[in-house]
Image (cartoon, helix red, strand yellow):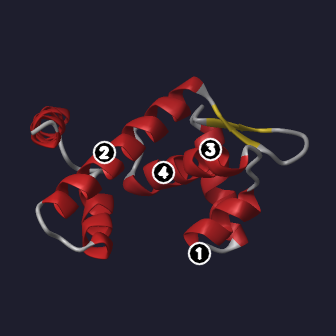
């Protein structure tokens, strides 16, 4: 199943919340993203059916290995791109917003080059 940008955003949000809180429910995701319960419920169902997460009897959302891989990749792109843009002089809000858009469409090759360049610059 090929994920769309919204699916990646949900997985990234679940990942970030799980790092912050440990236990994540659909209501937490909705509050974090500003989405309604029905929207989150639909997305969770699609992601569950696609094998990206499981829902426990207690309502807890747990990323599968596939979901964790997508979430971590998306989060890494977000954090590296945000930091890179801020290093270029872009204000934090704009850098974060732009990174959020770009993280879903940037190729692996281009991201690897940006990451390498950024890491080299940070060592100077």
Where is 2 relative to 100, above or below? above
Please tell me whether mark 3 sits on a helix, a strand or a loop: helix
Please tell me whether mark 1 sits on a helix, a strand or a loop: loop
Q: Earlier in the sequence, mark 1 or mark 3?
A: 3
Where is 62 relative to 98, above or below? above
- Please state the horizontal and vertical placement of residue 106, each as a whole percent of the image: 19, 46
> Which residue reaches farthest top?
65
Graded by Cα atoms within 10 Å as few (under 14), some (14 to 19) or many (20 or more), the crowding at tag 4 reads some
Residue at image mark 3: 19
Q: Earlier in the sequence, mark 4 or mark 3?
A: 4
On residue 7, the disc is: 4
Residue 1 visible, this angle: no
How far apart are the two marked residues, 1 and 4, measured between alpha carbons? 15 Å
Residue at image mark 1: 34
Q: Is residue 117 left or right of residue 100?
A: left
Q: Earlier in the sequence, mark 2 or mark 3?
A: 3
How far apart are the two marked residues, 1 and 3, measured between alpha carbons? 19 Å
Quadrant containing the C terminus is top left
How far apart are the two marked residues, 2 and 1, measured between alpha carbons? 22 Å
Residue at image mark 2: 77
- Please state the horizontal and vertical placement of residue 57, each as a whole percent of the image: 90, 40
Q: Earlier in the sequence, mark 2 or mark 1?
A: 1
Q: How many marks?
A: 4
Please tell me whether mark 4 sits on a helix, a strand or a loop: helix
């Amino acid at each position: 199943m090929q994920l769309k940008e919204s699916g990646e955003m949900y997985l990234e949000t679940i990942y970030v919340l799980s790092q912050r809180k440990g236990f994540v429910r659909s209501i937490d995701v909705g509050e974090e993203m500003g989405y309604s319960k029905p929207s989150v419920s639909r997305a969770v169902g699609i992601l569950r059916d696609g094998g990206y997460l499981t829902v426990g009897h207690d309502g807890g959302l747990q990323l599968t290995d596939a979901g964790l891989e997508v979430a971590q990749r998306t989060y890494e792109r977000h954090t590296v791109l945000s930091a890179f843009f801020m290093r270029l002089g872009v204000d934090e809000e704009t850098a974060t917003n732009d990174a959020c858009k770009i993280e879903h469409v940037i190729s692996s090759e281009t991201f690897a080059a940006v990451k390498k360049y950024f890491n080299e610059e940070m060592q100077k």
